[in-house]
Image: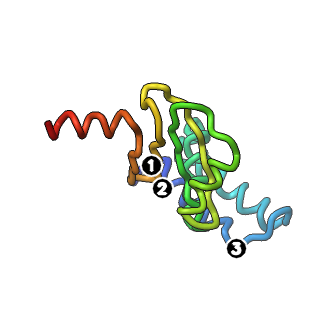
Amino acid sequence: MVRLTSTQWGKVLYELTKDVKSNSKELDRAIALFGDMLQKNYVLKRIDAIIEAYEAYAKKQAGVKELVITAARKLNVDEIKDIEKHFGDTVESTVVVDPGIIGGVVVRNGNVILNGSIANQLEQLKHSL
């Protein structure tokens, strides 16, 4: 028997529901079928991770970019929007405050990290001297 990861189960749920109208009996049947599949494969205990994987995969399929913006201080809405506009129209951001970066921002978009922090610039200067 092949055991699927939570990420794979999330993709299965996406494929089962992607073309189904919300609030329909067809969606109810798809969810019930998926629940049965989880139960038969003894993975119901992983439902939280599966739903998280489903949400991440659905956002990726919809072209939503998820950013994590780290700043030394709390950013206002305009500053956040100014950063987001460089990544397209469909962006969701999480802002983290970390005084340790001294100033500037670090933006993570998936596996890509753009580090414009003062701490990073000081570290690069230290290595060049």
| Residue 112 image point, x, y percent | 39, 54
Q: Earlier in the sequence, mark 3 or mark 2?
A: 2
Marking on residue 5: 1
The mark found on residue 29 in the picture is none
Q: Which residue lies most toward the left here?
A: 129
Q: Residues within 10 Å of mark 1 (few under 14, many from 20)?
A: some
- Residue identified by numbered label 3: 19
Q: Which residue matches tag 2?
A: 8
Amino acid carrying mark 1 in the image: Thr
Towards the viewer: 54 or 97: 97
Label 3 element class: loop
Q: CA distance from mark 3 to mark 1?
A: 23 Å
Q: Of the residues shown, which amino acid type is indicated by label 3?
A: Asp
Residue shown at the point (39%, 52%) measured from the top left: 111
Could you say which quadrant of the image residue 115 lies in? top left
Q: Are marks 3 and 1 in contact (CB under 8 Å)?
A: no
Q: Nearer the viewer, residue 21 or 109?
A: 109
Tell me which residue sits at (24%, 40%) in the image.
124
* Residue 129 position in % (x across, y down): 14, 36
Q: Earlier in the sequence, mark 3 or mark 1?
A: 1
Task: Give the image location of residue 37, x and y in percent.
Answer: 60, 53
